Image (cartoon, rainbow, N blue to C red):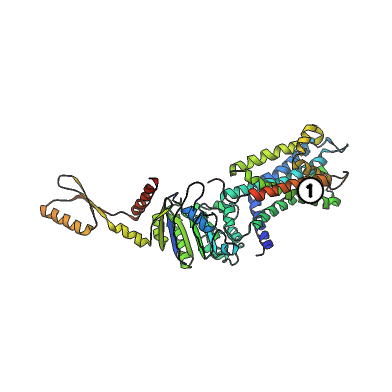
Amino acid sequence: MSGLALVGHQFRFDQKAFWRNPASVGFTVFFPVLLLVIFGTIFGSDNVEVRGGHIDTDTYYVPAIITMAIISSTMQTLAMSLVIAREDGRLKRGRGTPMPAWVFIAGRVGNSIVTALIMLALLALIGGLAYGVHFPWDRIPAILLVLAVGAAAFSCLGIALTAAIPTQDAAAPIVNFLLLPLYFLSGVFIPDDQLPNGIIHFADVFPIRHFFLAFFDAYVPGGAHTVAWGHLLIVAIWGLGGLLLAIRFFRWTPRSG
Amino acid sequence: MSYGETEAVRGIDLEVARGEVFAFLGPNGAGKTTTVEILEGYRKRTGGEVLVLGEDPATAGRGWRDRIGIVLQSNSLDPYLTVRESIELYAGYFSHPRSVEETIALVGLEGKADDRARKLSGGQQRRLDVGMALVGDPELLFLDEPTTGFDPSARRQFWDVIESLQELGKTIFLTTHYMDEAQRLADRVTIIAAGRIVARGTPEDLGEREKAAATIRYRDARGDEITIETLDPVRELNRLTGEALERGEELDGLEVTRPSLEDVYLDLTSTAEGVTSE
């Protein structure tokens, strides 16, 4: 098989394994859906102040939870599944075959990006049907561009993060301790008009806030621009940093035993 | 060859001929896995020369990996893929794979082809592991302690699989800490202990050692326990029983024992450990 055909081959089996694994489906698919329903139901009648104007809370939460689902499909899924495969000896085993390393990684990243697209469609559909947040069809190019940059960057960060996770048991706690607080502080879970300035400045250091703002601007009509290039650039720089760390520190052999 | 601070193995000379089953036997911690990982290209050696299928594993590329199959010491399966999918996945990695169905039959998992790996028993998972290594139709197959922790019937089934590979003419490099496994499967055995080779030969050669000395035990007329070590137990027994008959006595509790291969092996490996600890 040629390199690209082999990526497709790897991807096909990664998708099967992903959808059959209750942990990955639970974290990546059901958790964001549940959050959208909870937030939409509890805060649905409120208004959020954005860019000096007011929008419906549902209109705020649909792109916010999509942001979270994209990060979950990429960074969280990759960090957890790669550590589990590494400690099981599956990565080492694969390195003993003629399959090139990049094919394996490309298959996994492809799996994450496709899952992110599925989550975009699913959450947009729920947002439209249940909460009347219409999908902005005219903004599809901007949405896909922001999604692609974010998915690539958070994939790199997820792969880099595996180097800091010593065991299978440590994977979920480490990933959640990193991501959950940042979702709150970055305005993903709590509308940012209710967050103190100090917290926003703190969250501005990390890529989640910038990815959220870029995605929000692409998804919600009425913004100053459809593509927030500045925020997108910061996300890309974080992704590049993750890529360099991943190249330097990613390992194929188990750390324990 | 070493890793970390301690030298794991030293002065090891191995030659494995095409088409043979070579058993590398030794207790846990003897240096078996270190050696096999150097041969597989996973581990860098600190010295010495290694050629596997004509290439140095440390620098060999994809073409070389296409010709070998590796089964690691612990199972490395995707729990959510079925037997057939796992083998199909690996078939895609190699340039001239065997047929997937044929490979499933070869490892005796026809009845389990649509079961996910996580539902299989330990022995079945191990055979799937071997199937994934075999589907690339390798010339050389590495098996690192393939039956550790198996119950007797699972071991026997696994041995049947290895014997059928032998008939296909595969070269097999097997590490094990079971003497009986080496004896049953291998054309040649090399015993390693504490990083050094302590014995080598065919299973029959090593078996010769067990013919070397026998122990005769009995109680004499006064009830004293008598133990005689002899190289010639037949003559010695004839003498003892002849004398006893002449005196009209019994030889109470008479038994003749020979060290089993296991004893030979334990003797060899414990001596080697004794030497290094001095």
Side (left or right) of A47 relative to A245:
right
Q: Which residue occupies the foreground of this view, A20 or B54?
A: B54
- Where is residue A151 shown, x and y percent of the image? 74, 49
- Where is residue A96 shown, x and y percent of the image? 57, 58
Side (left or right) of A6 relative to A228:
left
Q: Which residue occupies the foreground of this view, B213 or A151?
A: B213
Quarter of the rendering occupied by the N terminus of chain A: bottom right
The correct choice, above or below, for A123 with respect to B90 in the image is: above
Numbered label tally: 1
Residue B235 falls in image quadrant: bottom left
| Within-10-Å neighbours for mark 1: few <14, some 14–19, many 20+ | some
- Where is residue A135 shown, x and y percent of the image? 83, 48
The correct choice, above or below, for A36 with respect to B232 in the image is: above
Which residue sits at x=67%, y=40%? A176
- Where is residue A87 shown, x and y percent of the image? 57, 48
Residue matched to label 1:
A125
Q: Is residue B127 visible?
A: no
Which residue sits at x=52%, y=63%? B105
Side (left or right) of B238 relative to A177:
left
Q: Which residue occupies the foreground of this view, A199 or B276?
A: B276
Q: Can residue A75 be seen in this view?
A: yes
| Secondary structure under the numbered disc 1 in the rendered image | helix
Check the residue under mark 1 and report the chain it is in. Answer: A
Side (left or right) of A133 relative to A111:
right
Disc 1 marks a residue whose amino acid type is Leu
Q: Residue farthest to the left?
A: B247
The correct choice, above or below, for A200 with respect to B17 in the image is: above
